[in-house]
Every structure is written in C-alpha cells, then in structure tokens.
Amino acid sequence: MASSTHSTLQAPSDEGNTPVQSRPVAAAAILVLGIAAILFGLMVSVSVGAADIRLATVWEAVFRFNPELPQHQVIRELRIPRAAAGALVGACFAVAGAIMQGMTRNPLADSGLLGLNAGAGVGLALAFAFAPSLSFTYIMMYCFIGAAVASLLVFGIGSLSHSGLTPLRLTLAGAAVSAMLLAVSQGIAILYSLSQDIAFWMAGGIGGASWKQLRIMFPWVAAALIGSLILSRSITLLSLGRDVAAGLGQRTRLVQTAGMIIVVILAGAAVSTVGPIAFVGLMVPHITRYLVGVDYRWIIPCSAVLGSILVLFADIAARMINAPYETPIGALIAVLGVPFFIYLAGKRKGELQ
Amino acid sequence: MFLFNLQGSGSVKLAVAGFLTTTLLLSACGNNNSNAGGNGAAATTAPSATVEATAAPAESAAPAVDKTVTDAMGHKVTIPANPQRVIASYLEDYLVALGVTPVAQWSTKNGTQDYLAAELKDVPPISYDLPLEAVTGFAPDFHIVQSEGTVQNGLYDQLNKIAPTYVLGDEVSSDWRAALLKIGELLNKTPEAEKAIADYEQKAASAKSAVSAAIGDDSVAILWLVSKNFFIVDETRSSGAVMYGDLGVKLPNLVTEIPAESRAPWNPISLEKLSELTAEHIILVNSDKAGGAEITEGAVWKGIPAVKAGNVHEFSADTSWLYSGPIANSKTIDDILSSFVK
Amino acid sequence: MNRFLPLPPDKPRRSRDVSILILLAALIVILFLVSMNTGFMRLSPLEVLHTLSGNGTRQQQLILFDFRLPRIVISLLIGAGFAVAGSILQGLSRNALAEPSTLGINAGAGFAVLIFISFVPATTAAPIFVLPLLALAGASLTAALVYFLSYRRADGLSPTRLILIGIAVGAGIYAFQLILSLRLDPQNYQFVAIWLAGKIWGGDWRFVLALLPWIMIFVPFACYKARVLNVLNLGDETSKGLGMPLERERLLLLATAVALAGACVSVSGGIGFVGLIAPHLARRLVGPRHQIMLPVAALSGALLLLTADTIGRWILQPAEIPTGIVVAIIGAPYFLYLLAKSKA
C-alpha cells in the first residue's frame, strides 16, 4: 500500500485488522482550543463588514443594545446571525462529510462532490420557479427532499450492488448525479429567467442569513448533530468494514439509514441557508482524522469545531478581500479544496482502484 | 397564476414528447391534413406574405431610396426604403415614441415590458434570445438589435439572412437621446425623433422646477429590490439619468461614495451598507414583493432615516423605473411628480 | 468488468452486428426527416419536399437550408464525436462511468468562453470562430493540466488518478466560473448560461465545415486503433506482456479523445452524458469489441443527440431548451439504471 506510513491515521480506507488508534488528549485539546477559536472568530466576524462601525459601538450593540440606533440594528440583525450561521453551517458540512466518509469507508466523500448539494439546488430552483414566495421553512424542506433524492440516487443504487461502491465509482457516480441535477436546475433557471438569482445562491453566501432562518434551521441541525454523536460509536465500527461491524453485533442497515438521514438533514439545512459550499466536508474530516485518530466519537465533534472555524474565517476573508463587495465563499473554499482533493487523489492510488 | 399555467402547458408537452415520433410519422401519412394546418399556421404568423418580396434588399422595389449605413459592429447594412415590418427587441420604447408599431415585442417567460403594455397590446411576443425560426415567422424586413452581446457567435449573420440587421451597440443605446435620433434616422423619422426629444426636455424642465420647489436640496436614493438583493441606481442610466441628470436631484451619499470607475448603472449594495444611507427620500422599486417583505419588515430597513421618516415611495416592477427610453423616462417623470409634488 | 473482455469474433454475431448498424442508420434517417419537419415554423412533409427540390418560398428555403439542416448535421457530428471520445476514455480507464466531462473538458471550454465574454467587450464583430477556438483551447489546456497532475514518474499514468483529478479540476473550475459569471451583466450572463448548458448554436454551415475535418480524421483513427483498445481492456500487465508500448498508445488515444471532445464542445457548449451513454448502448448491442463497438457507439451518439435536439426545439415552443439539458434529462434514467445494474 502506497501510504502505509499513514495507514493507521486514515480509518475509512484501513483494513479491518489495523488496531484502532485514537488520541483523546489531542482531541480534547482541539475541542478546547477550537471552541476558543470559534469565539474569537465570532467576535472578529461581528466586527467587520461593509458598514463602517467602530469597535466600541459593536460591543455596545452586543451588551447595551439600543434599538433606536441603526448601527446597533446592523450588528444585531445582520452581523450576529451571519457569524452564527457561518459557524453552524461549517459544522454541518464537516460532520456530514465525516459521517459519509466513515460509513462508506470512502476518503473522497463530501456532500458537494457526491451530488447532495446539487440535489438541494434542484429543490431550491423548483421553489424559486414555481413558488417564489415560499417561507424559509418550505424552502428548507425542498432542499431536504432534493438532497435526499440525490443521496438515494448515489448511495441507494450503489448499495444494490453486492460489493458496495469503491471510492472511484462513488466519486464518478456523484459527479454524474451532480451533472444531471445541475442540468435540471439550469433548465429550470434558463426557462424561468432565474439564472443569475440561482447563480448568486450557488456561489454560496452567508450574507443573507437572518435570525428567522437560524431559528428555523437550528432545531434540525442541533438534533442531527446530537444524533451524529449518538451514532459515532457505530460509525467507528462501520468504518472498519461492514462485515466487521456486523460481526460485532451492529445492525449495519439501521446505522447506515440513520446516518444517511442525518447527512441529508445537515446538508439540506446548510445548503438552504448558504448555498452549496463544497470541499468543507472533504477537507475537515481528513485533517481531523490526521490529528485525533480513527475514533469517530472524537472525529465528529472535532470535525464540527474545525468546520465551524474554516467557514467562519473564510466568510470573514470573503468580506475583506474585495471590500465592500463580497467574494463568493464557495469559490474561496474551493481554492483550498481543489489542491487538497488532487493531493488525496494522487496519493491514494493503491486503495482507490 | 401565470407561472402555474406555464407549468401546466409544460407538463402537457412533456407528456406529448414521448409521442414525438409517432405524431410526426402520422402527420407524414396524413398529408392533406397537415398541409392545411401548416398553411394555417404560416398565415397567422406571417400575415403578409407579399411584403416578404420587398424584404430582400436585392429585389427591393425602389432601390433609389434604399440606404446603406454602417452599424456599431462595422457591418454594412442596406436598409429598405420604407421598412414596414420592424423587429427591435428591447427597443420597443423608441419605436412607440416614433409612432412605429413593431411586428413582435421583446419577452421572457416572465412577460413583456409591462409599462408598454397599453401601447403594444396587439403586438405578439418574441423571446429575448431571438430564435431564428420565430423571427423568420414574423417576416420582418428590418431588425434593430440593441447590444453587440445579443448577436455573438454567428447569430448576426443568421439574422441578417432573414432581413437586414442593424446593431445599435451598447454605446449608443446607453444614451437614449442618441439612440432615439439614430433609430429615427434609420426609419426616416428624424423629425419625429427630434420632436419627441424636445417634448421630453420641456416636460423635464418644468418638472425640475416643480421638484426643486417641493424637496429643495434633499437627496433621493433609487433602490431596486430583487430576490432579496438591493441595487442602487447611479446617475448614468434609466431612472437615475432622469432623477439626477434631467431633474437635477441630489445624489445620495452611498452612490457618491462608490468610486466613479467601479460604478455600474445598478450597483449591488448590502442591507448593512444601506443602513448608512442618509438620503431624505427613497424610491423603492420592488421586484420582490413576496420574498422581500422579510427585509422591508426588518429592523435594519426600518432604521434607515428615510424609512423612519416615512419617505419611502414604492413602485412595482411593472412601472418604467427599470427601463430607459423616451416613453419610460417620461413615465418616470410622472411618477416622480406624483411622489414629491403634491 | 467482465463485460469488457473481448469475445472471439464469430459468424452469426457478425451478421447481427451489420443489421444493428443498418438499423441505427435507418433510425437516424427517419429522425432526420422528423427533425426537418420540427420547429417553430410549421413545414409539412410535402412542403419540405417542395423546398428540397428547390420550389419553396424564400422563407421556407431559409428555414430549411440555413437553419434546420446545418443544425441537424451538427447534432449528428457532435453526437458521434462525443460518443467515440467517451468510448475511448472508458476503454482507456477501464471504467464504465468515464466520459469527456469527467476529464474537465467541458469545464475548461466553458471557462475559456466565460473569460472571453467577461473581459472582452463585444463592441466589434468578433470573427465567428473566436469562441469555438477559445473553447477548444480551454478544453485542451484543462485536459493537459489533468494529465500533468495525474502523471507520476514512478507508475506512469494511472487511469483512476486521471479521472479523480479530472473531477477535482472540474469542480475547481466550476467554482471560478461562478465567481466570474456573477460579475456579468444579465444579458451576457444569459448568453454564458445557455452556452454552459449546451446549445447547438443557430446552426451555420461554417460550423459544420469547421467540425467535419475533426470528426472525419479522428473517428476513423479511433476505429483504426480499436485493436489497441481491446488489448488495453485486458489490463496493464497483459498489455505490456503482449509487447504494447503502453504509455505511448495511451497518450495517443487520450489525445484523440480530447481532440474529438474538444472540437465538439467548442461548437456545442457543455453537453455531457452522450459520451457516457452511447458507449454503453453500443456495448449492449454489439459487445465490447471496439472494431464494431466504436461505429455503433458513433451512430448511437448521433441518434441520441439528434433526438435531444429535436425534442429541445419542439417541446416548449417557441422557447428552446438547450440541448445539453435535454440530453441530461433523457440520459439520466439510463445512467441510473446502469449504476444500479453494474457491479463494483
């Protein structure tokens, strides 16, 4: 195996006989430092923006809120939800990626690459075209359904074949399903002259996040994240192989179904709020596994924390690079994600074939 | 409702799609039948087949008055002496001002230019991307195309095969007076064009003094709200040119703060930045009545000084504010007067 | 993978192959006739005949000779080109899900066009071939980049790595396309959006002439290399054992596929799925021997694309649906069926 020196660090591709290694100390450190970094990121995020607001005013808006002052309203109504949404969707994408990578033992799983984001996009295009005045709850439902359909297409059909999906086949299937779903969205967009509206959304943007959206998505996301922690032990076993997991008394079908539901909720909620941001779910779990080892009880919370940090700071950068205009965050993250993907694809020759 | 209808007819056609081959093979067998249908369709879409002969520049009846001009892209265009069947997609405003009725009008799935609905109510729509067969079906004898961007990738040559095609160009069409004069010249209607401009200037001058008396030195921001994004209008184009140029109203701070070289006719602006708008009045062109309510009900929007003071004048997307041209601008002046001059 | 194993040629099989070729050709002719009758302007079969024999009105001649016929011919050429390119890539990578767009070819072509539209104002008449040439350059550069990134001195060109890196590069380009397209004004945006979705442009005999040499050279060349593709299917070790210069042949075939797909993309915009589905169809019909499979794939691809273009022109009249979208929507169910059926 080409990457034998790293093999204990990369659970999904490991053979069942490698010992399960994890580093609880490193993981605990990541959680503590990471949460501190998130708090710091939230503060920075609230302090920068298109409107020129002094730092002192920012803190007044947070701690001595005065609804009469427009600047306070900007902080309250725009910047705080935006920062919170960034942190939240970062966790969503990262945990969705971690679960998919663990369950499918596939190092290249990511909600963007496997078509879930594109599926949610079709849901959104349908919502824009046929019911432009839908409330956010329904838009999110459309995205859930779209993401669910996409994941059924990619995984459901893949799992029909006896030996499961190899990473290569899964990635190809994801690319093809993405292409197909993208074509459907494009068709709707071109016919209904929505193209640029949808393009804005496709490029990903946290700017539009509002308290209302957060209030609606938060219960779903919280439930899904808690669910992923409950499932984390089973996912660790699944990541050793379905046969191993079944041998250890796991009800693998049940775990996989529950895992997929969680992934669909996480991806759908995140996509409906900020658009399809790819590569977070690919990069973060890898980095996390490298740092904390192969136990998903640690990987999932640490991925959530690191994903939050990534998206939070990328969003800050998106506001500062070309101020006062915003750079699409999806593209910013792709700048990191593409080389990462190429690195993974280049390195893992033996295992992917 | 409109969308719903479209959806319905779309799905019907989808269902029929499966029978494509069958249907056409059947129609091939029933020659008489389909022949009659075909002629019927041709008759309705191209009411005057005889005009077609004059459409070809070569066989034009009166070559003496044909004129050859050079368009914005450098094409030599020979215009028939007296164009009868003109298509000038997205330039209908000018044709109406010159008293010319086009044979087809610009449209998208979402409809036509609503503010011209009364003037163009009998004119059939044609899709904005000018599908060649549809254009042929209208048997035009002269095309005017607004922008170079519309006829890229060989579309110009194809259109020119149907009828002489003149590209006005972005430079000319960004200045409605120049565009009107140019179109007037092409259609032998220079006096009408000059008169339309003179009438407009007179109307603008009297409106200018009325508005200045009413709001004095106040600044007015024109905002366009579409799919939850705001755009702010500068002084160069459409309603901005009317408001700030012709009527001399003061530009709002947020426009003057944008460096001139990066200014666009419509500048995207975040709600956060809008909170710093100091203009006394806001014209809100609302293309997002349903989805935008969340924003216009929000605390940030309500905290903007002009909104707080109740000085928001809202217009729907079917008004002339988003368009440019003699008719559009004149209607915009009417709207400004009704907003500020009581 | 066992479907790829070459079968020994046998007599009854061969006569079946010929009849399949004839059947496909006949279907194309029928669809050709149907397509000539299809469009916004109704032309009855009789009128079409009249016009073809030179007795139509000027309008009818314009529609038939200048708009419909070139478009039909372009559809056929593009369909065949994509299909053969896809067959080569599937053979090379020994992977049934590979197709030209997996190598980032569509993305690269689209990106080149987008850059041109974004930064070059359309104030003068650009020569008609500027966009196609740029698209071809974008496609080739992307393919070269993917090749370069996936080549390792140690083990040469791994087909798996090629595909994965193609997907990665495609995803990256797509992200930048989005950034650029947001800066466009709506009119140019619509143009680019439709280009990216894959539309067979108006139809123009000059495009036919531009495309024809590529198809006429590279499709026969691919057929000439059919034996090499058969051997490659047996695996790297076997191919080497049979004394084949593996790397050289692979590069040559890859270049052929890129030339075909790049030329097609440059005229059609981002059409996918034809290169994925047509080879499968062909393999089902005549088996994996490339000598017969390639021509059948070319015909199936031509048929598929002509069908899609005809439907796209007709179904939502007077609006047209970009052909790429119709192809994706027709192709998707078949693709999913393949995905469900195929073994890992």
Image (cartoon, grey):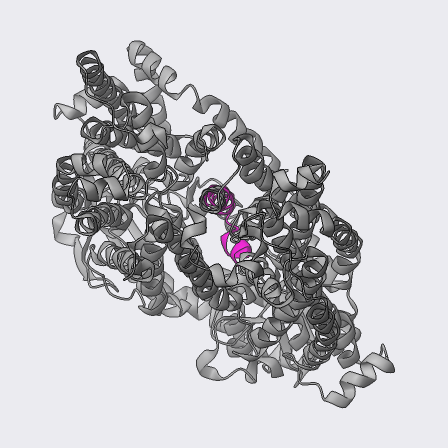
C131 or C65: nearer the viewer: C131
Residue A330, position in %: x, y?
A: 54, 63
Say if A162 sits above or below B250 in the image.
above
Does residue B12 appear left or right of residue B92 in this picture?
right
Does A187 lie within the magenta span? yes
Would you identify the image quadrant in which residue C325 lies? top left
C234 or B175: nearer the viewer: C234
Q: Where the N terminus of chain C falls, by quadrant? A: top left
Does residue C209 appear left or right of residue B257 in this picture?
left
Would you identify the image quadrant in which residue A211 lies? bottom right
Q: Main secondary structure of the magenta part?
A: helix
Residue B147, position in %: x, y?
A: 34, 60
Residue A243, position in %: x, y?
A: 62, 38
Say if C259 sits above or below B320 in the image.
above
* Residue C328 seen from this side: yes
- Residue at the spot 55% in from the left edge and 62% down from the top edge: A283
Say if C66 sits above or below A327 in the image.
above
Say if C298 sits above or below A238 in the image.
above
Query: How many numbered circles does the render carry?
Result: 0
- Residue at the spot 13% in from the left edge and 40% down from the top edge: C221
Task: Give the magenta part as a residue range.
Answer: A179-199
Residue A103, position in %: x, y?
A: 62, 46
Would you identify the image quadrant in which residue B340 lies? bottom right
Does residue A73 appear left or right of residue B57 in this picture?
right
Does A197 lie within the magenta span? yes
* Residue C177 seen from this side: no
Does residue B22 appear left or right of residue A103 in this picture?
left
